[in-house]
Amino acid sequence: MVRTVEVNKWFGDRHILTDVSLEVSRGEVVVLVGPSGAGKTTFLRTLNQLEPIDSGEVHVNGERIGERVREDGSVRPMSAKDLARQRADIGFVFQHFNLFPHMTVLENIWHAPVRVSGEKRSDAIDYARELLDRVGLADQADSRPRALSGGQQQRVAIARALAMRPALMLFDEPTSALDPEMVGEVLQVMKDLALAGMTMIVVSHEMGFTREVADRVVVMDSGTIVEEGDPELVFTDPSHPRTRQFLSKVL
């Protein structure tokens, strides 16, 4: 489902990602962990080109993202229209919800499928209601985002991402902006998605969730992958000194 090849990203003179290569199988749940500044969020954002890469390749669902390879082997940027089509196949859930405040919860969910994908409005509304029921918020369809708790808003954000029927879901620390008592309700929705077979890449500091749900944990530090493997093995017997140092502070 996902293949990155030696991805590099610079911000000015700062080398944020260095030769990051990763493969994620269809239906796999991969959690990226590591200290702040390790490059986890930047790497996640390169997967749908919210952060364009400086070198390397990103492939999702069999397509090279954001670039086209010419017959002579040269690479050129993809058109904005074609990139938007690719992004529609990649759901992204941010830390801070980013819901449209002037729309109802239901409108937030059906808006993109109708405006971006040209889906029939009645079908999009029906699916939006189905998704709200799936995340436990069927009774909030006509509410405005400001009337919801942080946990409820994040569940709406997940439903909104799912409305595009993505092949891949990306989560960037989806519980970091929530009060502790609201974390569990969001993680439960994510667990349900994992059980349903959704391919997911998650940046998270929730080690309990990682241990329970992840098929693989990937440890990043200073813009590189230093270790990856089964969560139980990595957490109990890490092989890299930087992993041991990081885990000693969070477990």
Image (tube, helix red, strand yellow):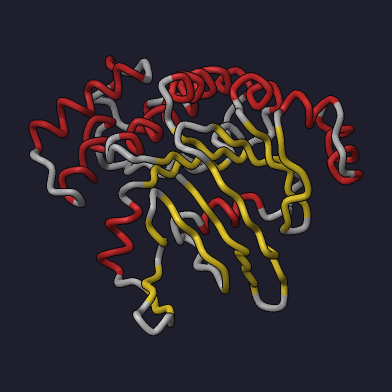
Left or right of 126? Residue 170 is: right
Residue in front for this viewpoint, 167 or 113: 167
Q: Position of residue 61 (x, y in %)?
A: 39, 48
Left or right of 234? Residue 174 is: left
Residue for point 25% across, 39% down: 103
Q: Quadrant of residue 139?
A: top left
Q: Quadrant of residue 209?
A: top right
Q: Position of residue 199 (x, y in %)?
A: 46, 35
Residue in front for this viewpoint, 227 or 170: 227
The quadrant the C terminus occupies is top right
The quadrant the N terminus occupies is top left
Q: Position of residue 84 (x, y in %)?
A: 30, 59
Residue in front for this viewpoint, 192 or 24: 24
Left or right of 38? Residue 216 is: left
The number of numbered discs placed on residues in the rendered structure image is: 0
Residue for point 32% across, 43% down: 100
Q: Position of residue 14 (x, y in %)?
A: 72, 72
Left or right of 106? Residue 49 is: right
Q: In the rendered view, would you say 184 is above or below 221?
A: above
Q: In the rendered view, would you say 149 is above or below 78?
A: above
Residue for point 34% across, 80% down: 71
Residue for point 30% across, 69% down: 80
Q: In the rendered view, would you say 11 is above or below 107?
A: below
Q: In the rendered view, would you say 16 is above or below 158?
A: below
